[in-house]
């Protein structure tokens, strides 16, 4: 197949050629970045939380009336005892926040008391000696809290935590040599240090914003039970295979301890699967939206190629007839239109690649996303070429099947 006649024909149809080429370029640029965003979102959604999600659920408890701090502390202890005595429950704890919660307390981590700028940021989980077992998180080094280390105070009265447990990711960040155990860091805003007595396995932060990705696995467990907030979150680990029974029994056990409490109708009792779905609902929504946009653009591009090729076939019926009369086979005619579309597609891909990189650079600058991988450009380019060749095949085949005699009669 000679390229020169094809290029000459494309010059005579500049408007249509430019239109299809630009459509392919725009589709490539948008689809590449859309696929990249989908991959980033799905990678983010699949991050491990570190906890035993299969058997874990959360009860958010609001108190009715004003309880004093000693009354609140006594009620929480009674509630936890009641939960732990249930046959369907493995363990239970009370926390201010938990992985994937989306809100909670985070604080700057410093290595020196007079350090001005933070070393890093971290979630602060108020915990007790049952927290690790409830979450299903193991210690990789050190020890757990003891019951006499747990303090129950309003947050305003808490000045320091003599001992803390940190996640292994935070420990590695702070002490790259692996000697975090027994070291002191500064977690509070005063000049009192905390000694690391334990290092937990993977434990995700409560922070879910995109800006918090750098701190996704920074977690500090402090031996404290917070009072004076008006509500408490109980995390309950059910025995294997008894999640539904535990979720049915636990609220009843709490009400039996005190009827002066409220469970929200929607989020009062949630499995951790529901917690995960809620935490990543924006990511799922963005991935679905980008997927729909990509499919629509690809469909529009394919339809444009089919429509324009059909139009060109109608305009060139006489030329096709003459070529057939001069000995061109159906395969020659089919090859002509397929090659013509391939050249337009390649031109659109070159422009689209530059446009895709430009869009990604803008997103990197303004939104802090990662740089676009060349594999996405390659996959999208191949997909568009295949799509274009598939779209042009039917009109080209119709052109190839035009009988020479039918056209030459009109000459």
Image (cartoon, helix red, strand yellow):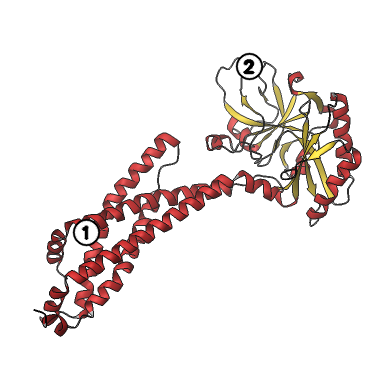
Along the line of sight, the residue nearer the viewer: 353 or 303: 303
* Secondary structure found at label 1: helix
* Residue 176 visible in this rendered orientation of the protein: no
Dot placed on the residue nearer the N-terminal end, 1 or 2: 1
Q: CA distance from mark 1 to mark 2?
A: 69 Å
The residue that disc 2 covers is 113
Left-right relation of 204 to 73: left
Quarter holding the C terminus? Answer: bottom left
Residue lying at 43% horizontally and 53% vertically, measured from the top left: 293
309 left or right of 328?
right
> Quadrant of residue 116 in the image?
top right
Residue under pointer 1 = 16
* Disc 1 packing (10 Å; few <14; some 14–19; many ≥20): some
Camera-side residue of 399 and 383: 399
Relative vertical location of residue 320 with respect to residue 177 in this rendering, above or below: below
Q: Residue at x 82, y 26 (%)?
A: 152
**Callouts 1 and 2 close, C-beta under 8 Å:** no
Q: Which of the 4 image quadrants contains residue 222?
A: top right
The reply to whether residue 325 is in sight is yes
Judge from the rendering whether residue 211 lies leftward or rightward of residue 248; answer left or right: left
Q: Position of residue 8 (x, y in %)?
A: 12, 62
Q: Residue furthest left?
A: 411
Q: Residue furthest bottom?
A: 405
Question: What residue is at 22 percent from the left and 61 percent from the top?
Answer: 343
Residue 254: % across, % down: 86, 41
Assign the N terminus to one quadrant of the image.
bottom left
In the image: residue 73, left or right of residue 398: right
Name the residue: 63% across, 16% down.
113
- Mark 2 secondary-structure assignment: loop
Instruction: Tell me residue 253's x, y (percent).
Output: 88, 44
């Amino acid at each position: 197949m000679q390229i020169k006649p094809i290029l000459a024909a494309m010059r005579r149809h500049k408007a249509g050629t430019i239109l299809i080429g630009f459509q392919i370029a725009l589709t490539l640029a948008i689809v590449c970045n859309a696929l990249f965003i989908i991959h980033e979102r799905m990678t983010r959604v699949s991050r491990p939380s570190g906890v035993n999600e299969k058997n874990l659920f959360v009860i958010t408890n609001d108190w009715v009336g004003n309880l004093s701090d000693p009354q609140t502390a006594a009620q929480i202890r009674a509630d936890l005892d009641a939960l732990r005595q249930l046959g369907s429950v493995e363990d239970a704890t009370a926390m201010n926040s938990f992985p994937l919660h989306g809100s909670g307390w985070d604080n700057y981590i410093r290595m020196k008391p007079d350090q001005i700028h933070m070393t890093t940021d971290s979630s602060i989980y108020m915990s007790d000696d049952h927290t690790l077992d409830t979450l299903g998180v193991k210690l990789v080094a050190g020890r757990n809290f003891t019951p006499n280390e747990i303090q129950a105070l309003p947050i305003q009265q808490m000045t320091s935590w003599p001992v803390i447990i940190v996640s292994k990711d935070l420990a590695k960040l702070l002490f790259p040599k692996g000697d975090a155990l027994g070291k002191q860091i500064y977690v509070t805003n005063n000049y009192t240090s905390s000694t690391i007595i334990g290092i937990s396995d993977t434990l995700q932060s409560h922070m879910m914003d995109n800006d918090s990705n750098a701190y996704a696995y920074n977690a500090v467990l402090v031996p404290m039970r917070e009072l004076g907030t008006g509500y408490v979150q109980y995390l309950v680990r059910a025995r294997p295979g008894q999640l539904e029974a535990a979720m049915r029994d636990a609220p009843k056990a709490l009400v039996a301890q005190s009827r002066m409490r409220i469970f929200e109708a929607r989020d009062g009792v949630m499995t951790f699967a529901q917690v995960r779905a809620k935490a990543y609902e924006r990511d799922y929504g963005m991935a679905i939206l980008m997927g729909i946009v990509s499919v629509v653009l690809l469909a529009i591009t394919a339809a444009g190629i089919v429509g324009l090729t059909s139009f060109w076939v109608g305009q060139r019926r006489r030329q096709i007839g003459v070529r057939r009369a001069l000995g061109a086979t159906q395969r020659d005619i089919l090859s002509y239109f397929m090659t013509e579309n391939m050249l337009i597609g390649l031109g659109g891909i070159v422009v689209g690649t530059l446009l895709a990189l430009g869009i990604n650079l803008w997103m990197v600058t303004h939104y802090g996303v990662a740089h676009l991988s060349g594999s996405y450009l390659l996959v999208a380019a191949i997909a568009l070429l295949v799509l274009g060749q598939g779209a042009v095949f039917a009109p080209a085949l119709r052109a190839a099947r035009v009988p020479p005699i039918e056209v030459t009669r009109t000459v």
